[in-house]
């Protein structure tokens, strides 16, 4: 399942307040549990909204989302690697 709010798409994409994202995620997870009550695990939910490095690290590091779709207009390969390093707690050699 992927969550992406409408104003995070297109050329004028903008970030969404964390509280709004958390509320929508709770509703999505609740609906998934209701729709698939016998699922052996929670169905993974990915965030597809406009996000920066710190938000991505927070969303992933705190286990809020199971993954993030990265928008290439905002991220460089260096920032992508930085998020992976920060979430995983590892440094490049």
Image (cartoon, rainbow, N blue to C red):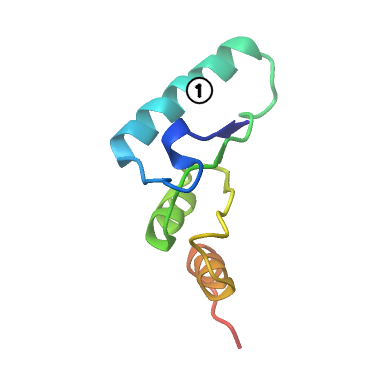
Q: Does 80 appear above or below 39? A: below
* Closest to the observer, 14 or 89: 14
Q: Quadrant of the C terminus?
A: bottom right
Q: Quadrant of residue 25?
A: top left
Q: Quadrant of residue 52?
A: bottom left
Q: Identify which residue is drawn at 57% across, 17% down.
A: 33
* Closest to the observer, 13 or 54: 13
- Would residue 6 appear left or right of 1 to someone viewing this image? left
Q: Identify which residue is drawn at 66% across, 14% down.
A: 36
Q: Does 9 appear above or below 40? A: below
Q: Does 3 appear above or below 39? A: below
Mark 1, Cα crowd under 10 Å, few <14 / some 14-19 / many 20+, is some
Q: Residue furthest bottom?
A: 93
- Find residue 67 and report its horizontal and vertical position in percent: 58, 47
Name the residue tied to disc 1. 28
Q: Does 18 appear above or below 72? A: above
Q: Identify which residue is drawn at 48% across, 48% down.
A: 11
- Find residue 54 and report its horizontal and vertical position in percent: 38, 60
Q: Quadrant of the N terminus?
A: top right
- Would residue 26 appear left or right of 46 to someone viewing this image? left
Q: Secondary structure at mark 1?
A: helix
- Find residue 79 and report its horizontal and vertical position in percent: 50, 70
* Closest to the observer, 18 or 51: 51
Q: Residue furthest front?
A: 11
- Find residue 56 and report its horizontal and vertical position in percent: 46, 55
Q: How many marks?
A: 1
């Amino acid at each position: 399942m992927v969550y992406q709010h409408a104003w995070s798409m297109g050329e004028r994409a903008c970030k969404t307040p964390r509280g709004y994202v958390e509320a929508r995620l709770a509703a999505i997870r609740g609906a998934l549990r209701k729709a698939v009550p016998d699922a052996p695990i929670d169905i993974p939910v990915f965030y597809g909204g406009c996000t920066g490095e710190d938000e991505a690290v927070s969303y992933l590091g705190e286990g809020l989302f199971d993954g993030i779709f990265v928008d290439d207009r905002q991220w460089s390969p260096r920032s992508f690697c930085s998020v992976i390093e920060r979430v995983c707690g590892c440094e490049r050699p």
